[in-house]
Amino acid sequence: MAPTRPRTLGMGKLLPCLLLAFCVHGPLSHASNTVSRDQPLSGGQRLVSQRGRFALGFFQPDDTAPERWYLAIWYNRISKHTPVWIANRARPISDPNSSKLTIAEDGNMVLLDRLKSPIWATNITRDISNSTIGIILDTGNFVLAPASNTTYFLWQSFDEPTNVWLPEAKLGWNKITGHGTRFVSWESSVDPSPGYYAFEIDPDGSNQFIHRWNSSEIY
Ligand SMILES: *[C@@H]1O[C@H](CO)[C@@H](O)[C@H](O)[C@H]1NC(C)=O
Ligand SMILES: *[C@@H]1O[C@H](CO)[C@@H](O)[C@H](O)[C@H]1NC(C)=O
Ligand SMILES: *[C@@H]1O[C@H](CO)[C@@H](O)[C@H](O)[C@H]1NC(C)=O
Ligand SMILES: *[C@@H]1O[C@H](CO)[C@@H](O)[C@H](O)[C@H]1NC(C)=O
């Protein structure tokens, strides 16, 4: 009995190292959770959150429309692509290989198409610096933060949701800017552009949620 024990312990320590080595060098090896100017995201690459819950990359909802790709976040452990957020929902790109998500010179995160035109950007001006990074978190939140302090979110996808309300995301209304969190349905099951149904807080302040149809008729 006694001699087998140390061996078991040895294997237990060795195995995670082997798995890690495989993950780092395997074919789906863009296991980083971070996008930066030195490390942009393109083609089939993806970011994966630290504990592996969420992935961010390019996604195609409609097999019959090969020229429509979106930058999206989905559940990394669900084999069927289930997007929870889309950056460019109304402006698909035609080719992820010649497009990239990167950090612009001013520090904003930007999705560039093959002509280097900005398709989507974080577009913030407050506190922006030229040394920022984008990080996909295990909550499904995609954030822009200074590289020197990744807990200080300059921008977060939770403030600009698509149609999914994830745990920990807040639904709110900014009285000063008049801007509220708003969830808007897809146009159809294969088209993520904004559809007819929206869900948001009542700007009249009565603490009730409202659903709208065509931005006017309230259900
Ligand atoms: C960023 O700001 C520019 C100028 O105001 C605007 O044209 C563009 O649509 C904005 N992009 C996004 C993704 O909001
Ligand atoms: C970032 O900004 C600082 C201060 O303005 C400047 O010294 C530095 O060269 C900039 N770095 C890059 C990579 O642009
Ligand atoms: C990082 O940002 C957080 C959140 O804004 C802040 O509480 C903290 O003091 C900052 N840390 C440093 C070292 O600046
Ligand atoms: C909803 O709005 C769209 C765009 O303005 C319009 O084309 C459509 O006819 C509207 N639907 C109904 C049922 O009014």
Image (cartoon, rainbow, N blue to C red):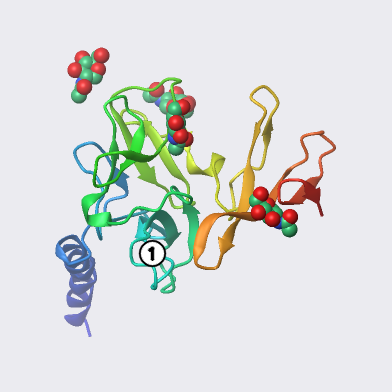
Which of the two residues, 169 or 193, is positioned nearer the viewer here? 193
Quadrant position of the N terminus in the picture? bottom left
Residue receiving disc 1:
60
Question: Where's residue 87, x and y in %?
Answer: 44, 47
> Which amino acid type corresponds to the residue marked 1 in the rendered image?
Gln
Residue at figure coordinates x 19%, y 73% from the top left: 11
Outermost right residue: 206
Q: Quadrant of residue 197?
A: bottom right
Q: Is residue 58 visible?
A: yes
Residue at figure coordinates x 47%, y 47% from the top left: 141
Which of the two residues, 15 or 86, is positioned nearer the viewer here? 86
Decide if residue 126 is on the left or right side of residue 97.
Answer: right
Q: Please count the marks in the image.
A: 1
Q: Quadrant of residue 176?
A: top right
Quadrant position of the C terminus in the picture? bottom right
Is 57 rendered above or below residue 127? below
